[in-house]
């Protein structure tokens, strides 16, 4: 029994030696860089103060119990924390010492107070938040006007999610989008988001955000109505996977070989179908008839016979065609 006790005491002193080495190595790295502003700001004054206070309470208890090993271990933690706290004030940062210790301490606490909820925001930041913010910006700008209330709403979410947001940069990116492609561009943004398989609860919240963005300026333009109906249809389809959502197919019926080549040139990934007694090309599935009609107009400009067809009717037509063969 005495041997076991002696062995434990030996390991305790070895542990204290390891603690001393650990404190030295950690402090050495920080002390070498104590003059750097970023190192000073990385220390939590409030957190270190709480640690010192907590250790002092335990130190008093160990002193009363005459627990030498714990007194040494706790004293090492206190000493290291005091050094880190002094570094955190910026006392050794070039040009700072003349401001005085208490001034530096108040300034450090002020900075820390502003950053106190940073980690919490990162924890609660929604998945794909940058993409969501981009979708909201594109919705706000779909009518080429950014109302002050729409701008404030976007800035609010950017700040909450700690995402850098530059109106100038976003509008600069929009210049690369042709006017007749802005609707499809926004739709593809949402499609990209949904293909990342986000949580259902988050997608439902996005639907509410889209509605809030559309109504932010207290008016609903034709552009906003057109795109919001399509986006909401896509979201409803995602949320109600087991429930059939009305879908519209945009198809092109080429009249000759030249038009077939034109379709393949314009839409390389179009799906070729055999129906109506001939060949047609499906160029997309949509959730709003108005949006599908708008897509039709883009291809009718090339004198291509383009129509909106309900997907259920199309599938039934194809089934009937197969049955007659």
Image (tube, rainbow, N blue to C red):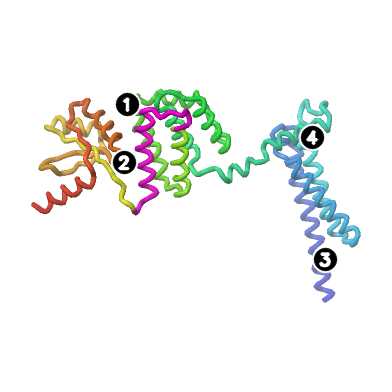
Label 2 vs 4, first from the N-terminus: 4
Disc 2 crowd rating (10 Å Cα; few below 14, some 14-19, many 20+) is: many
Q: Position of residue 120 (x, y in %)?
A: 62, 44
Under tag 1, what secondary structure? helix
Under tag 4, what secondary structure? helix
Mark 3 → mark 2, Cα distance in angstroms: 74 Å
In the image, which disc is placed on residue 180? 1
Q: Quadrant of the N terminus?
A: bottom right
Which label lies toward us, 1 or 2? 2
Q: Is residue 104 visible?
A: yes
Label 3 vs 4, first from the N-terminus: 3
Which label lies toward us, 3 or 4? 4
Mark 2 → mark 4, Cα distance in angstroms: 59 Å
Label 1 vs 4, first from the N-terminus: 4
Q: Position of residue 20 (x, y in %)?
A: 80, 52
Q: Say whether residue 235 is left or right of residue 324.
A: right
Disc 4 crowd rating (10 Å Cα; few below 14, some 14-19, many 20+) is: some
Q: Is residue 325 visible?
A: no
Per the image, the residue denoted by label 4 is: 105
Per the image, the residue denoted by label 3 is: 9
Residue at (44, 41) in percent of width and height: 207
Residue at (13, 51) in percent of width and height: 320
């Amino acid at each position: 029994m005495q041997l076991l006790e002696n062995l434990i005491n030996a390991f305790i002193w070895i542990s204290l030696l390891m603690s001393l080495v650990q404190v030295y190595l950690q402090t050495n790295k920080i002390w070498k860089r104590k003059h750097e502003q970023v190192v000073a700001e990385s220390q939590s004054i409030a957190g270190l103060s709480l640690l010192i206070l907590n250790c002092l309470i335990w130190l008093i208890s160990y002193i009363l119990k005459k627990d030498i090993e714990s007194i040494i271990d706790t004293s090492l933690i206190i000493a290291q924390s005091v050094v880190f706290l002094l570094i955190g004030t910026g006392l050794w940062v070039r040009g700072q010492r003349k401001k005085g210790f208490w001034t530096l301490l108040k300034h450090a606490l002020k900075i820390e107070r502003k950053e106190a909820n940073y980690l919490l925001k990162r924890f609660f930041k929604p998945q794909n938040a940058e993409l969501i913010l981009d979708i909201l910006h594109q919705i706000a700008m779909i009518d080429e006007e950014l109302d002050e209330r729409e701008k404030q709403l976007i800035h609010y979410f950017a700040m909450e999610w700690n995402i850098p947001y530059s109106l100038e940069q976003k509008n600069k990116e929009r210049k690369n989008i042709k006017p007749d492609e802005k609707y499809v561009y926004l739709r593809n943004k949402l499609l990209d988001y949904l293909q990342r398989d986000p949580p259902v609860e988050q997608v439902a919240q996005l639907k509410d955000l889209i509605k809030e963005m559309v109504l932010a300026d207290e008016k609903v333009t034709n552009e906003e109505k057109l795109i919001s109906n399509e986006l909401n249809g896509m979201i409803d389809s995602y949320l109600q996977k087991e429930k059939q959502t009305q879908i519209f197919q945009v198809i092109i019926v080429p009249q000759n070989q030249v038009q077939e080549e034109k379709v393949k040139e314009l839409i390389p990934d179009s799906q070729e179908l055999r129906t109506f007694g001939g060949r047609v090309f499906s160029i997309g599935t949509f959730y709003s008839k108005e949006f599908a009609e708008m897509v039709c107009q883009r291809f009718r400009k090339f004198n291509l016979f383009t129509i909106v067809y309900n997907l259920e009717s199309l599938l039934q037509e194809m089934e009937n065609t197969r049955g007659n063969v």
